[in-house]
Image: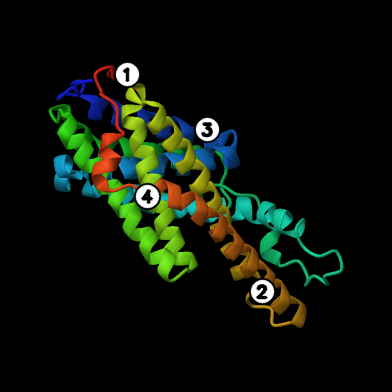
Amino acid sequence: MKRSKHLPPRLLEHHFIQRNDKLLITLLRTSINFDASVHQARKLLKEIRAFLRMSKPLTGNRATDYHQYLRQLATDLGQFRDQYVLQSVWQSFQSHLPERLALPPLPRELIRPECSLGTDPETPEEFISRLIDITHQLLLRSEPVQISLQHSDIDYPWAMKRYRWLYLRGRKAHSKANQTPSAPLYHDLRKCLKDEMYCLRLVKPGWNEFIRKRHKRLKQTTERLGQANDLDLLLETFHTNASTETARLLQLIRNRQTRQWAKAEKELSRLLCYTPEEYGDYFPSLIEINTHC
């Protein structure tokens, strides 16, 4: 079937507005359900930043200020996410430990304090005021991006060029992690794979079976790599304790992390086995895509 040369008008703008609005609403919901909303907001921040990287040839420097603000907001929320998952990561890891292993004392970091978006205790009024300021900054800084996307209609060759670029970033990151396995390199690989996964959603109404399966596999693989990455939180938490029990525990954590990477490698060999040309050949005709994706 012949591919459409043109994608729907204002596709990028509609996609950007939808994700940005969803982020604003999710941040406001932190006043009701903090943990779940912070988790969702961090995912949206990653998705929007992935979209900005993909569309950078069109937005240029106009997205720089907004992108930097998103990065800082992601960093601020990251500390709360780490506190949120640390205890669940520890409990999950404990379930795989030998029954007779003598565990070191539970670190204070695993006793989770109450969280809010402020660094100090805030009244409800102060908390809401801070949320309003964050959402105002997001709206203000996102406007130049939206304006630059209003007249940035794209065609199929442009989209495929950018998707191949995302795919090649993943292959290069995987080559580095595979040659010298380490937590930072696998973390970089995970970010590249997530960029591709998030950006595939831009053309979701036009997915064929290959893209649906690929998105599912990208999600599964990045989740596994995320579980391995979370084990670093335990390594950091127990690292200051020099007892014999802790040394053994640290080795068990590293062993489990290595096993997670090995399992991910089996999935990665299928995800990243295509040449850039083969990767593009599996994409569908995008005739059926509408502007409401």
- Which label belongs to residue 29? 3
Image location (x, y in percent) of residue 154: 16, 30
Q: Nearer the viewer, residue 101 or 21?
A: 101
Q: Residues within 10 Å of mark 1 (few under 14, many from 20)?
A: few
Image location (x, y in percent) of residue 127: 51, 42
Q: Image check: 234 left or right of 94?
A: left
Q: Nearer the viewer, residue 52 or 111?
A: 52
Query: What quarter of the picture does the N terminus occupy?
Result: top left
Up/down of 90 relative to 144, above or below? below
Q: Earlier in the sequence, mark 2 or mark 4?
A: 2
Q: Earlier in the sequence, mark 1 or mark 2?
A: 2
Front of the two marks 2 and 3: 2
User: What amino acid type should be assigned to the residue bearing mark 1?
Assistant: His
Name the secondary structure under disc 2. helix
Query: What quarter of the picture does the C terminus occupy?
Result: top left
Hey, which quadrant is residue 105 in on the image? Answer: bottom right
Image location (x, y in percent) of residue 223: 53, 47
User: What amino acid type should be assigned to the residue bearing mark 2?
Assistant: Gln
Name the secondary structure under disc 1. loop
Q: Earlier in the sequence, mark 3 or mark 4?
A: 3
Instruction: Identify the residue under disc 1.
Output: 292
User: What amino acid type should be assigned to the residue bearing mark 4?
Assistant: Cys
Up/down of 253 relative to 83, above or below? below
